[in-house]
Amino acid sequence: MRPYVVTDGRSQPTRNTLDLVTLVIAADDLPLTGLSPEKRDLMELCGPGALSVAEVAGHLSLPVSVTKVLIADLMDSGHVVTRAPVPSARPSETRILQEVLDGLRARL
């Protein structure tokens, strides 16, 4: 039930440009008032620097699909911007997924 509540019942983000390695960067000058607790947590998490979608999902303990909806909402409101990682530094998706799984298992 929680993911349904967090995304206001939506299962798809408003933007389809987000993948696991897309970098999320918080805007400095916008107020956090009116944002849900999960969106505020996301903003605070990305405030010090860029994090990938997979990292954000892991830190927030939310499914990637839910995290993408939240990030897309924050992009629409101007609270975050996203960037593709540097192509030469982009690891394989298999390696990223394995690292995410290892990290999640380590937390349990």
Image (cartoon, rainbow, N blue to C red):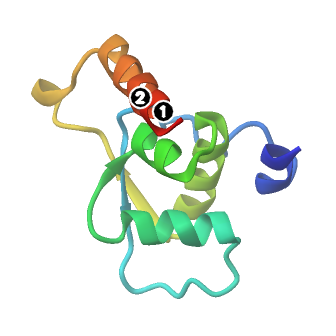
Q: Position of residue 55 (x, y in %)?
A: 40, 43
The residue beneath circle 2 is 100
Locate the C terminus and report the quarter of the image it occupies.
top right
How many numbered marks, from 0 up?
2
Q: Position of residue 33 (x, y in %)?
A: 64, 87
Type of residue at label 2? Val
Q: Residues within 10 Å of mark 2 (few under 14, many from 20)?
A: some
Type of residue at label 1? Leu
Side (left or right) of 85 relative to 6: left
Side (left or right) of 79 relative to 94: right
Side (left or right) of 104 relative to 95: right
The residue mark sitting in front, 2 or 1, is 1
Q: Outermost residue, left direction?
A: 88
Q: Position of residue 41 (x, y in %)?
A: 54, 67
Tag 2 near tag 1, CB within 8 Å = yes
Residue positioned 63% across, 58% down in the render: 73
Q: Residues within 10 Å of mark 1 (few under 14, many from 20)?
A: few
- Please state which of residues 66 and 86 is positioned toward the viewer in this rendering: 66
Q: Determine the CA span between mark 2 and mark 1.
A: 6 Å
Q: Position of residue 24 (x, y in %)?
A: 38, 53
The residue beneath circle 1 is 104
Q: Is residue 80 above or below residue 28?
A: above
Residue positioned 58% across, 43% down in the render: 68
- Please state which of residues 58 and 15 is positioned toward the viewer in this rendering: 58
Residue positioned 30% across, 16% down in the render: 95
- Please state which of residues 107 and 15 is positioned toward the viewer in this rendering: 107
- Find residue 35 and report its image quarter: bottom right
Q: Is residue 94 above or below residue 16?
A: above
